[in-house]
């Protein structure tokens, strides 16, 4: 039996505040704040189920203190989260899905130290699982999300010439404001029950 539901396609812009940390061999850094921003598109499969994809410039990283000096690790990615979402009540969406990210730059900066390029210590492709919720007020939306990174591997040579491998992953809390660019345009689709 077929029923008629409404589906729509939306596009918009998103501004994000990140609170990120880096976990190395089970030890987590302090949180570092950064920003992310870009575009998103969402498509309703049914009245309550849909898919959203984003293309974001994403600042991640962490902070730690070594020898009395605070060192910030700044990791900049091009991130592509794709989430399947469920809308249990109107305007409230709960989503879950993968986030794939390409490392653009990686730099470390101490209080009185020069900026050091550390890109070679990080994998160029980052994988994570993103989940969270969003609520919309007309064309404006608010989002809270956690992005749990999967373990990657970093390797480096110590002073003695020994190659050391470590597991490393990014973890990020995100708080975002989005703005839908298009007006709502509904179209009729069929859903089989």
Image (cartoon, helix red, strand yellow):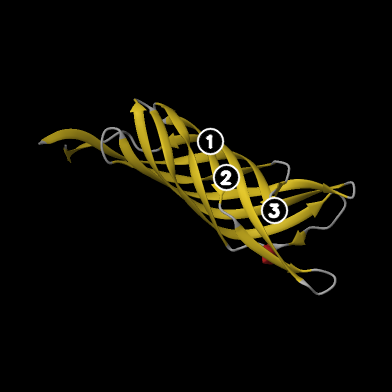
Q: Earlier in the sequence, mark 2 or mark 3?
A: 3
59 in relation to 95, above or below: below
Disc on res. 129: none
Q: Which residue is mark 1?
A: 176
**Outermost left residue:** 1
**Outermost front residue:** 26
Q: CA distance from mark 1 to mark 3?
A: 27 Å
Residues at circles 2 and 1 in contact by the CB criterion of under 8 Å: yes
Q: CA distance from mark 2 to mark 1?
A: 9 Å
Q: Earlier in the sequence, mark 1 or mark 3?
A: 3
The N terminus - image quarter: top left
62 in relation to 151, above or below: above
Q: CA distance from mark 2 to mark 3?
A: 23 Å
Dot 1 falls on a residue whose secondary structure is strand
Drawn side of residue 34 relative to residue 98, left or right: right
Q: Residues within 10 Å of mark 2 (few under 14, many from 20)?
A: many
Q: Which residue is mark 2?
A: 36
**Residue 188 x, y percent position in the rendering:** 18, 37
Q: Residue at x 68, y 58 (%)?
A: 106
Q: Image quadrant of residue 138?
A: top left
Q: Which residue is mark 3?
A: 24
**Outermost bottom residue:** 161
**Residue 176 x, y percent position in the rendering:** 53, 35
**Residue 113 x, y percent position in the rendering:** 85, 55
45 in relation to 149, above or below: above
Could you tell me how many numbered marks the image carries? Answer: 3
């Amino acid at each position: 039996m077929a029923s008629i539901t409404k589906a729509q396609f939306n596009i918009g812009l998103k501004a994000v505040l990140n609170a990120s940390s880096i976990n190395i061999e089970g030890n987590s850094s302090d949180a570092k704040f950064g920003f992310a921003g870009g575009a998103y598109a969402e498509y309703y499969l049914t009245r309550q189920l849909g898919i959203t994809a984003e293309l974001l410039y994403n600042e991640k990283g962490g902070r730690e203190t070594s020898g009395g000096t605070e060192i910030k690790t700044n990791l900049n990615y091009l991130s592509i989260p794709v989430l399947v979402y469920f809308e249990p009540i109107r305007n409230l969406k709960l989503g879950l899905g993968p986030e794939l990210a390409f490392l653009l730059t990686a730099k470390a900066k101490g209080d009185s130290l020069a900026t050091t390029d550390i890109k070679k210590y990080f994998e160029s492709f980052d994988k994570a699982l993103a989940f969270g919720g969003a609520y919309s007020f007309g064309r404006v939306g608010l989002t809270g999300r956690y992005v749990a990174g999967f373990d990657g591997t970093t390797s480096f040579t110590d002073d003695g010439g020994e190659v050391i491998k470590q597991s490393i992953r990014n973890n990020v809390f995100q708080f975002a404001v989005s703005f839908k660019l298009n007006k709502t345009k509904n179209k009729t689709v069929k859903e089989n029950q």
